[in-house]
Amino acid sequence: MIKAAIFDLDGVLVNTSNFHYAAWRDLAGHLGFTLTDEHNERLKGVSRMSALEIVLEIGGLSNLTCEEKLRLAEIKNKRYIDYISQLDESCLLEGALECLNKFKERKIFIALGSASKNARMVLERLKITGYFNAISDGTRAIRAKPDPEVFKIAADDLGVPYDQCLVFEDSIAGIMAAKTAGMKTVGIGDERILHMADITYKSLKEYVLNNQNAL
């Protein structure tokens, strides 16, 4: 029996990957190299510092000090915040609000499990903070997915056993993290990529349409 629904943020409830990409691309340009769409695929679903390491590897800049890396991560984050200031509730992905409402009506706990350190700001911009009984994000979880820490924090906050949690994820790293914790998984996206998920839908809208009886 499912007692908690845990949602990843980017790619599930909202698509901010284009803003992340724009901010990383700006940073790469500042450092003197170009970031491509193909490179961007490697940046999805990982923490800010892990993504920075990938970007620096792409640019051949692997010998920077910790202080320099932190400075660059902050530059990227400021650019990202500039971009997400454009967000509002119209940016929610199809089916997101309906899905949240359905779980709320059933009195299923709702939590966020996101690597983003800006997750609360994004939720506020989308005007959906009030739906969440727990928020586990990059300010609390030290280890990035596929480590299950971010999902375990959410479940622990709710007091719900891991095997009674249903995780909605759009990345293979997120699916692996949830399954490592013993949680049930719904992949949102391409079934060929998210083949490890218990079941996959193209969007939350499709999930809602195919689970009317359960919801």
Image (cartoon, grey):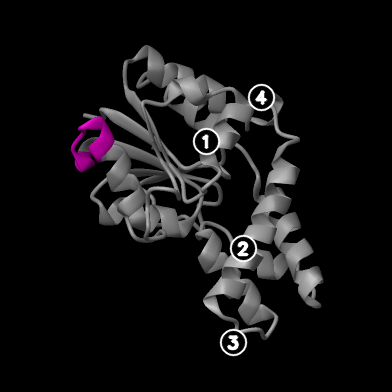
Are the residues tagged 1 and 4 within 8 Å (C-beta)? Answer: no
Q: Nearer the viewer, residue 189 or 88?
A: 88
Q: Which of 62 and 4 is in front in this view?
A: 62
Image spot of residue 23 (x, y percent):
72, 57
Q: Name the residue under label 1.
A: 120
| Quadrant (top left, top right, bottom left, bottom right) of the C terminus | top left
Q: Which of disc 2 and disc 3 is earlier in sequence?
A: 3
Are the residues tagged 2 and 1 within 8 Å (C-beta)? Answer: no
The secondary element bearing badge 4 is classed as helix
The secondary element bearing badge 2 is classed as helix
Image spot of residue 39 (x, y percent):
67, 70
* Magenta region: 156-163
Q: Which of disc 2 and disc 4 is earlier in sequence?
A: 2
Q: Name the residue under label 3.
A: 63
Q: Is label 1 or label 4 in front?
A: 1
Q: Mark 4 points at which residue?
A: 89
Q: Which amino acid does label 1 sit on?
A: Arg
The secondary element bearing badge 1 is classed as helix
What is the distance, in whole Å, between disc 1 and disc 4 at their CAs?
Answer: 14 Å
How crowded pointer 3 is (Cα within 10 Å; few <14, some 14-19, many 20+) is rated as few
- 4 left or right of 98 in image: left
Note whether residue 94 is visible: no
